[in-house]
Image: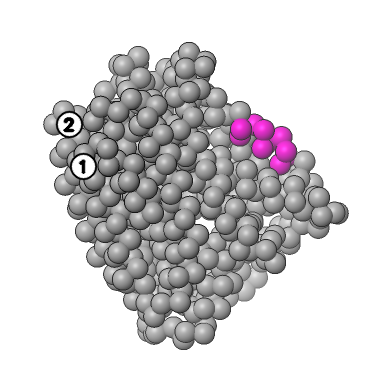
Amino acid sequence: MTRHSPRPQAERELAADNSAGLVDAEEDSLPRPRPPHFRSRAARLLFGASLVLIAFNLRPLFSSLSVLLAEVMHETGLSTAGASLLTTLPVVCLGVFAPFAPRLAQRFGAERTLLGALVLLAVGTGLRGVGTVPLLFAATLAAGAAIAVSNVLLPGVVKRDFPDSAAIMTGLYTMALCAGAAAGAGLTLPVEHLVGSWSGALAAWALPVLAVMLVFAPQALAARPQAAHSGFRVVGLWRDRLAWQITLFMGLQSALAYCVFGWLAPILRERGFEPAVAGGIVSLSVMAQVVTCLLVPSFAVRRRNQRGVNVALVAIATVALLGLMFAPTWTVPFWAVLQGIGQGGLIAAAMIVIVLRSPDSHVAAHLSGMAQGVGYVLAAIGPLLVGLIRSWTGSFDAAALLMVALGLGAAWMGAGAGRALHVGATTLAIHKEDA
């Protein structure tokens, strides 16, 4: 396939149409999913609030475990290697189960699929309270699968149903994701002190899932799913070098992010911080991500290319992570904020290059699926290796070499992904008799 430089105006229009990186996973569906008919402004506001609350519940699973990892290992006898597998499992789920989401939405409708994912997330999160190691792994697997499906479908629903307020909804969606991760890091230990057990504190995060599920269920069940099939296919994507650079950029920057989610609290506790303080620092870092998550897309899309933006954000995130590991303890809050600024910008940059490097919205949907499916499986290597390094060496210090390697790889791939080119892929219509 011939790769070409995108026309600036076309690139800007596509980026605007995709709402700063919100890619519709149902882009290939025929007939196109119909947005719901709201009987009143209040009903529309309730639906929008429900989507934001669903987003809030997609991140506590990752951050809540890390602040209690020492207690879980002590009371269950879980080894450091076992703990690294446990922290890695939900990240693997993001890649493995994401490809199933569009097909589920075509069969059951996006709203009902999201409702089913909420039920699975509530069950999986609640079962983490049983306290046995096998069930802890099984429950994490179930909850991770639910988050993977929601991760893929929710941005498209937000984009589809609120086209006239896309910027506001994108901002609320982004803030909800960060707020959920920050709450998991900052509130889990206080909850543990309140209920008196680590298992109860982990299971408590099923309560906000149940709450939004009860609010969302009548709306999802009222939606009328329509039979749909895939009306388009994209060829040439998996053989394209630029597509792989985007995918590896997504995976490597995500590896850094999930090292923070999974291991920053234990790293800080090993440095001498009290457990609640360590959780608060992680929460601070995650909330700092909101700033650049919101600002980077509008800035990056105005640049001739995104190479410098991508490399600079990787450098900020990586250097700040090293500061969190080795700098004087009194500087840790500064490094936490800086790391959040870099990491939040990277998340946004990885999503926006998917849109900017795609010649049309169908390619964007497939490139997003490739980047998330392969990228998140690759990202799981990061937290897994951090735990194994801690097990092999008895310290987190050697993990700094891993962070540097991930940063260098992300910068290299980010420079490639930031070039002002389109991936060499073509969209073909599928005739109904071939579907």
Which numbered marker is on residue 395?
A: 2
Q: Earlier in the sequence, mark 2 or mark 1?
A: 1
| Magenta part, dominant SS | helix
Q: Position of residue 213 (x, y in %)?
A: 67, 36
Mark number displayed over residue 126: none
State the residue in front, 271 or 357: 271
Quarter placement of the N terminus: bottom left
Judge depth for marks 2 and 1 and give the one in front: 1
Q: Seen from this angle, which residue lies furthest front?
A: 330
Q: Is residue 232 left or right of residue 402?
A: right
Residue that appears at 33% across and 65% down = 310
Task: Give the amino acid type for the residue marked by disc 1 in the picture.
Answer: Ala
Q: Is residue 216 magenta?
A: yes
Q: Residue at x 25, y 36 (%)?
A: 329
Residue that carries the numbered disc 1 in the rendered image:
327
Residue 382 to residue 159: above or below: above
- Which residue is situated farthest in the right direction here? 39
Q: Is residue 105 left or right of residue 262?
A: right
Residue 423 lies in the magenta-colored region: no
What x and y, as percent, mark residue 366?
48, 65
Label 1: state its secondary structure: loop
Q: Which residues are magenta?
A: 208-217
